[in-house]
């Protein structure tokens, strides 16, 4: 191997290491500087194809918000109304069609979940307690980090986090979630507002509607 080839390979390794490092750096900036956020989302869930059947695809839309260190909210609007709220103590799941609310203790229900990645963690170091984090090459104009839960017995297989950075502002653009059954869920965020002044703790208060069944597993 001549000196020119060696230099080119060394440059490639250096550039690769810089690209891989940047994803984790961007995630760190997002976790530390984005204390709250609000966005619209589109979720596309693709189930694995079965013999003789095509893969099933379901699309839903709604709004999302979080307030660190322990509050987040998903309001699914189409095709069916559903609300998921973590108020810091309880994780609420309200299915309007079933007229049913499920309430679980938040500390036990979250664990190694995508919500923990984006809404409750304070730093990359805190995430590494539950996840193995690997920066990935830039793609689709975004910086990516692959997160794999250390607890392999759960329902989550991996999450890819896609982030964009503009000046001092870091935005969450995509979450690509793969579960243990091979189902793939992609959440794309739009109109992502960082630290909006109108977002406060009251946004994450959930009171079960009158007349619905409340289940506490």
Image (cartoon, helix red, strand yellow):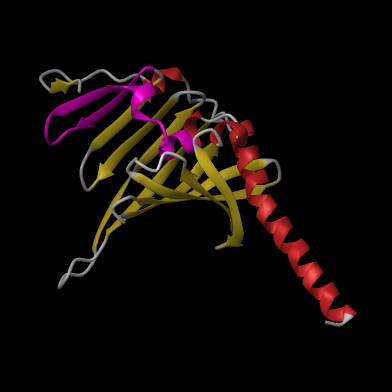
Residue 14: x, y in percent? 77, 62
133 and 53: which one is in front? 133
Q: Is residue 213 above or below residue 22?
A: above
Left or right relative to 133: residue 152:
left
**Looking at the figure, which quarter contains the N terminus?**
bottom right
Left or right relative to 110: residue 214:
left
50 and 58: which one is in front? 50
| Rendered residue at 26%/18% (across/down) | 207
Residue 209: x, y in percent? 18, 21
Which region is colored magenta?
Answer: 89-117
| Rendered residue at 28%/25% (across/down) | 92
What is the quadrant of residue 211 in the picture?
top left
Q: Is residue 32 magenta?
A: no
112 and 86: which one is in front? 112
**Looking at the figure, which quarter contains the C terminus?**
top left
Residue 103: x, y in percent? 25, 22
Left or right relative to 95: residue 72:
right
199 and 85: which one is in front? 85
| Rendered residue at 53%/38% (across/down) | 193
Residue 72: x, y in percent? 41, 29
Residue at the far front in the pictured view: 1
């Amino acid at each position: 191997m001549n000196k020119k080839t060696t230099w080119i390979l060394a440059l490639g390794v250096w550039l690769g290491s810089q690209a891989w490092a940047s994803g984790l750096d961007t995630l760190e900036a997002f976790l530390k500087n984005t204390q709250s956020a609000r966005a619209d989302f589109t979720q596309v869930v693709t189930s694995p194809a079965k013999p003789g059947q095509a893969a099933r695809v379901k699309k839903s839309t709604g709004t999302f918000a979080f307030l660190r260190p322990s509050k987040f909210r998903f309001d699914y609007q189409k095709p069916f109304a559903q609300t998921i709220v973590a108020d810091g103590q309880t994780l609420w799941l309200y299915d309007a069609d079933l007229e049913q609310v499920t309430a679980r203790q938040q500390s036990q229900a979250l664990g190694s979940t995508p919500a923990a990645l984006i809404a409750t963690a304070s730093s990359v170091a805190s995430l590494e307690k539950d996840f193995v984090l690997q920066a990935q090459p830039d793609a689709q104009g975004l910086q990516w980090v692959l997160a794999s839960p250390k607890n392999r017995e759960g329902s989550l297989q991996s999450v890819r986090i896609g982030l964009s950075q503009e000046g001092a502002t870091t935005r969450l653009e995509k979450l690509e979630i793969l579960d243990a059954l091979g189902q793939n869920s992609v959440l794309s965020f739009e109109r992502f507002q960082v630290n909006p002044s109108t977002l406060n703790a009251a946004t994450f208060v959930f009171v079960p509607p009158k007349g619905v069944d409340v289940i506490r597993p």
